[in-house]
Amino acid sequence: MRAALEAADMCDQTTNWILQHPAYQQMKDLEVGDSEQLHAAFLVYMDLTEVRRWKEVSCVKSPELQMVLLEAKEKEGAPVQTIFPLPVHRSLSHRSIRQVLDRGFPVLLCAVAADSTLVYQRMTDGLVTPDPPAGPFQDVGRRQHRKRRQQR
């Protein structure tokens, strides 16, 4: 029986390259106990390193949350950011958000869907004023209205 289980496990490892990937093994060694969040963290890791080409991507354990977080730089010389991978159907508490924000780095929440879709959302400590719209916009609404009034 044991030999059959070991053979099945070996077959799974040869057909599932994720289980053999060094980054996945490093995350697994953190012993967070949540295989779904571990898988989500690995997908985000691959996106950051292979698609977005972020620098110095590493994984760290959040002992309070029992989750894998990622730390990375968007480009050389950029500040370190914490990336919080989370399966999309999981909920967040204020406490868990606070614990990630209290690490001292800017935070990106990454929702990971079952089909491997990733959606990043920047999180801030408090309210942030939005950037003004980009483009050749002019505030002509009132001026045109005044001109019409004057013409009457």
Image (tube, grey):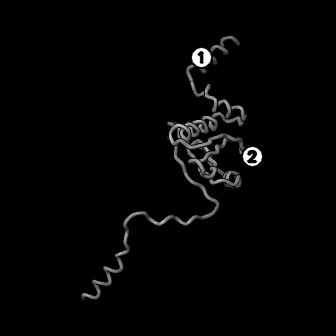
The quadrant where residue 69 appears: top right
The tag earlier along the polypeptide, 2 or 1, is: 1
**Residue 86 drawn above or below residue 150:** above
Could you tell me how many numbered marks the image carries?
2
* Direction from residue 132 to residue 75 in the image, left or right: right
Checking the image for residue 64, the label placed there is 2
Q: Is residue 88 visible?
A: no
Q: Is residue 52 visible?
A: yes
Instruction: Give the residue drawn at x 51%, y 42%.
Output: 52
How packed mark 2 is, by other alpha carbons closer than 10 Å (few <14, some 14-19, many 20 or more), is: few
**Residue 138 drawn above or below residue 101:** below
Question: Dividing the image into 4 quarters, which one contains the N terminus?
Answer: top right
> Could you say where residue 127 lies in the image, as x and y percent from the top left?
60, 64
Question: Dividing the image into 4 quarters, which one contains the C terminus?
Answer: bottom left
Q: Which amino acid type is shown beneath numbered disc 1?
A: Cys
* Direction from residue 72 to residue 62 in the image, left or right: right
Extreme-left residue of the structure: 152
**Residue 53 drawn above or below residue 151:** above
> Could you say where residue 93 lies in the image, as x and y percent from the top left?
66, 52
Instruction: Give the residue drawn at x 29%, y 84%.
Output: 147
Checking the image for residue 70, the label placed there is none
Residue that mark 1 sits on: 11
Extreme-right residue of the structure: 63
Contact (Cβ within 8 Å) of mark 2 with mark 1: no
Instruction: Give the residue drawn at x 60%, y 55%.
Output: 123
From the viewer's side, name the closer residue of 55 and 51. 55
The kind of secondary structure element at disc 1 is helix
The quadrant where residue 38 appears: top right
Q: Which amino acid type is shown beneath numbered disc 2?
A: Glu
> Could you say where residue 78 lies in the image, as x and y percent from the top left?
59, 51
The kind of secondary structure element at disc 2 is loop
The residues tagged by marks 2 and 1 sit, at their Cα atoms, a distance apart of: 35 Å
